[in-house]
Image (cartoon, helix red, strand yellow):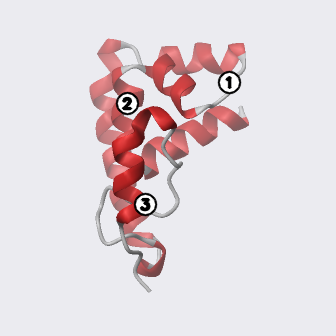
Amino acid sequence: MDFLATVIGNAVADPAFRTRLLDDPRGAIDEWGFRLSKGEMRMLDEMLTEDKKEKLAQAFDNLEEQLLEAVPKIVLCPQKQCPGFGCYPPMSQESLRKKLDELKFVA
C-alpha cells in the first residue's frame, strides 16, 4: 500500500500529475514509473471510476490548498504548479520538465 500512498500524495502535491492520473490512471502510473501491486491497482481503479473522479479531483484540490498553506514558502517554487515536493515528470512530459528546470526556487 506504500506505493499507492505515494501516488495519492503526488496527486495532491503535483497538479500536472493529478490531471494525468485523473484522465488516464494506468497511463500516468506507467508514465511516471510507479510500480503498484495488483491490489493497489484494483484500489486505484475503484477510486477513479467515472462517477467518483469529480469528487476526488475536488478533494485533491482542497488537500493541495491545505498543504500549500502548511509548508514553509522556502520549499516552493514561485508558481503554484511547481511545488518542490512533487514527483519529477517522466521523459514523456518533456515540456513540463523544461518548464520546471527553468524555474527559480525561492531562496
**Amino acid carrying mark 2 in the image:** Arg
Query: Which numbered disc, 1 or 2, marks the residue that appears first in the sequence?
Result: 2
Instruction: Tell me if 102 is positioned left or right of 84 in this view.
Output: left
The disc placed on residue 101 is 3
Badge 2 marks a residue whose secondary structure is helix
Check the picture and name the quadrant holding the N terminus.
top right
> Could you tell me which residue is drawn at 52 percent across and 60 percent down?
85
Is residue 15 at all visible to an observer of this figure?
no
Q: Position of residue 31 (x, y in %)?
A: 52, 27
In this view of the protein, which residue sits in the foreground, 77 or 7?
A: 77
Classify residue 40 by image quadrant: top right
The residue to which callout 1 is attached is 36
Distance (Cα) linking label 1 and label 3: 28 Å
* Residue 5 seen in render: yes
* Label drawn at residue 20: 2
Point out the image quarter for the C terminus: bottom left
